[in-house]
Amino acid sequence: MLRSTNKRMAHSEPMRWHGDRIVILDQRRLPQERVERTLCDVGDVVDAIVTMAVRGAPLIGIVAAYGLVLAARHGRASVLEAAHMLRSARPTAVNLMRAVDRMRAIVVTASDHAIVQALEQEAHAIAQEEARANYAIGIWALQLIRPEDGVLTHCNAGALATAPYGTATAPMYIAHEQGRAVKVYATETRPVLQGARLTAYELAQAGIDVTLITDSMVGTLMAQGKVHAVIVGADRIAANGDTANKIGTYTIAVVAKAHSIPLYVAAPTSSIDARTPTGAHIPIEERDASEVTTISGTSVAPAGVHVYNPAFDITPHHLIAAIITEQGVIRAPYEDKLARL
Ligand code: MRU
């Protein structure tokens, strides 16, 4: 198992820490090109997060944490300033805020001479915790999928969003490692096409049976009996279980409910935000109109057309069959169970 994991990691590893710089796989260029980009300071890190060269809730938390190690070389005040910039780089994924807050807590207590080392240790801890959570989520989630089930996923909650197994994809990778057949349907995920460019790419690279569909085909596949479960990731889970995830998740949840197909949210506990009571309180990032008016740089809309581009939506808790974290599977009512996590 370890051998196949290492092989897959080598291909889908989204970032590496080199002590004085971060090397990322530029996810905007996939799958056509595997281009690495070096981030030397916090400005580079913020830019990579904002432009989605790195993306996915756990990964942006990890990269931000290492970004603060880079800032620490310029002193304590630089870390606090960088923390502020990083926190606001993308507003929806709570993993980003949580990672930055953990690092800030270290800055407050560490002595001047030990600050870089202490921050580096904390960044390693965050990265390792997310990696461990991936595997545990996969083991729990696998119990919810029967052999031969068709499993639909949306966006990319895969190894590219948090190595090595991803969250929503973790049961797929583990089933594959165990020699169990798994059939995955990946939505293309307009407007930025994370499903087509990233999920289809990384699962196909791993040899997993993945079929790409457009977002508008979900209802038809469900009506045809091809989909038995939906597994998605999360950018933030509110205290009542309402979940922010990539735009389109809510639509899929409604259609899944109409077909009595369970929709599972697979996310680490770092995605749970007990301080946000419901989905209505989660800030939803709005991104540039060009993401909607173009596809791969080619314009597909009339110049100057009005555009609305929320990057995430809220799936209300009553449409979620279960939330799978590294600590296990929880079902409604969520509030008390999430609070205990
Ligand atoms: O805008 P993105 O690509 O960062 O959005 C990513 C998602 O919505 C993922 O589903 C979520 O972050 C979970 S990643 C494990």
Image (tube, rainbow, N blue to C red):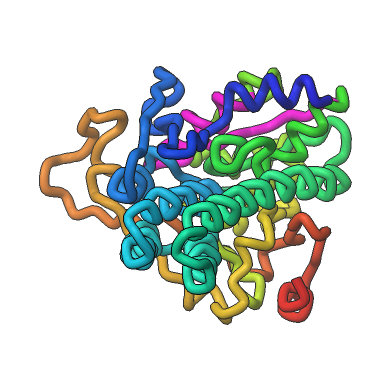
Regarding residue 333, the answer to whether it shows in the image is no
Q: Which of 29 and 314 is in front in this view?
A: 29
Q: Quadrant of the N terminus?
A: top right
Give the quadrant of residue 263: bottom right
Mark count: 0
Does 229 sit left or right of 89 as displayed?
right
- Where residue 43 sits: x, y (%)? 28, 49
Q: Is residue 330 above or below residue 261?
A: below
Q: In this view, does 65 lie above or below 319?
A: above
Q: Which residue lies furthest to the left in this view?
A: 304
Q: Is residue 94 magenta?
A: no
Does 320 sit left or right of 249 as displayed?
right
- Where residue 304 sits: x, y (%)? 11, 48
Q: Residue at (41%, 18%) from the top-left corner?
A: 32
Q: Is residue 109 above or below residue 143?
A: below
- Where residue 214 sits: x, y (%)? 49, 34
Q: Residue at (80%, 26%) from the top-left corner?
A: 2
Give the quadrant of residue 23: top left
Q: Which residue lies furthest to the front in this view?
A: 113
Q: Does the magenta stretch include residue 202?
A: yes
Q: In which quarter of the image is the C terminus?
A: bottom right
Q: Which of 258 and 235 is in front in this view?
A: 235
Q: Residue at (55%, 42%) from the top-left corner?
A: 161
Q: Which of 179 and 16 is in front in this view?
A: 16
Regarding residue 174, the answer to whether it shows in the image is yes
Q: Which of 211 and 331 is in front in this view?
A: 331
Range drawn in magenta: 180-203
- Where residue 279 sits: x, y (%)? 53, 73
Q: Residue at (39%, 22%) from the top-left corner?
A: 35
